[in-house]
Amino acid sequence: MVLSAEVSQTIAGGCLALLGTAVAGMFSVLAAKAGSKWEQAKSDLQSLCDQVVAYHKLEELYKHEVNALDPQRGAAVTVLKNMREAVVREIGIRPKMTAEEARNIAGRYR
C-alpha cells in the first residue's frame, strides 16, 4: 500500500505533534517534581531555623540554671562560654548563628 504525499505529511505531522506533547508533558512532570522538592527544602529550612532559635532559648535557660545550682562554675555567661567550648572539643563545630540570624534566614523563605 502506497500512501500519497499528503497523507504521509499528515501522519508525520501528527507523530511530531504527539512527540512534542510527550516532551512538554515530561517537562511539566519534572518541573512539578522540582517545585515539590523546593517546597520541601523551604519547609526543612524553616524547621532548622526554628530549631536554632529554640536551642538558643534552651541554652539561655540552662546557663542560668547551672549558675544557680553551682555558682562556683562562674557567671551565667562564663557557663555558656565553657559549654560552647566543650561542644567544639566534642564535635568540632562552634555554634555561631544567633537566634536573630536564624529568624532572618527563615523569613527570606516564607
Image: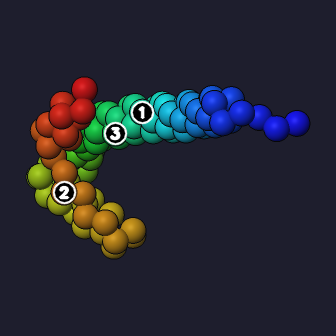
Q: CA distance from mark 2 to mark 3?
A: 17 Å
Numbered disc 3: secondary structure:
helix
Q: Which mark is residue 96?
A: 2
Q: Which residue is denoted by mark 3 in the rendering? A: 45
Q: Which quadrant of the view contains residue 47?
A: top left
Q: Quadrant of residue 79?
A: bottom left
Q: Amino acid at mark 1?
A: Gly
Residue at 62% over, 35% down = 9
The nearer-to-camera label among 2 and 1 is 1
Is residue 108 shown left or right of residue 48?
A: left
Asked if marks 3 and 1 touch (Cβ < 8 Å), the reply is no
Amino acid type at mark 3: Leu
| Residue at figure coordinates x 71%, y 33% from the top left | 4
Q: Position of residue 3 (x, y in %)?
A: 77, 34
Above or below: residue 87 compared with residue 75: below
Tell me the SS state at disc 2.
loop
2 or 3: mark nearer the eye: 3
Q: Nearer the viewer, residue 30 or 14?
A: 14
Residue 41 as seen in the image, left or right of residue 56: right
Sequence-first disc among 2 and 1: 1
- State left or right for residue 8 relative to residue 104: right
**Place of residue 90 in the rendered image (x, y in percent of width and height, measured from the top left):** 39, 70
Q: Residues within 10 Å of mark 3 (few under 14, many from 20)?
A: some
Residue in the picture at 34% in, 39% down: 45
Where is residue 86 shown, x and y percent of the image? 31, 66
| Marks 2 and 1, how far apart at CA | 31 Å
Residue annotated with mark 1: 35
> Which sits in the foreground, 89 or 15?
15
Give the quarter of the figure containing the C terminus.
top left
Instruction: From the viewer's perspective, tell me whether residue 78 is left or right of residue 36.
Output: left
User: Quarter of the image holding residue 15?
Assistant: top right
Q: Residue 50 has which mark?
A: none
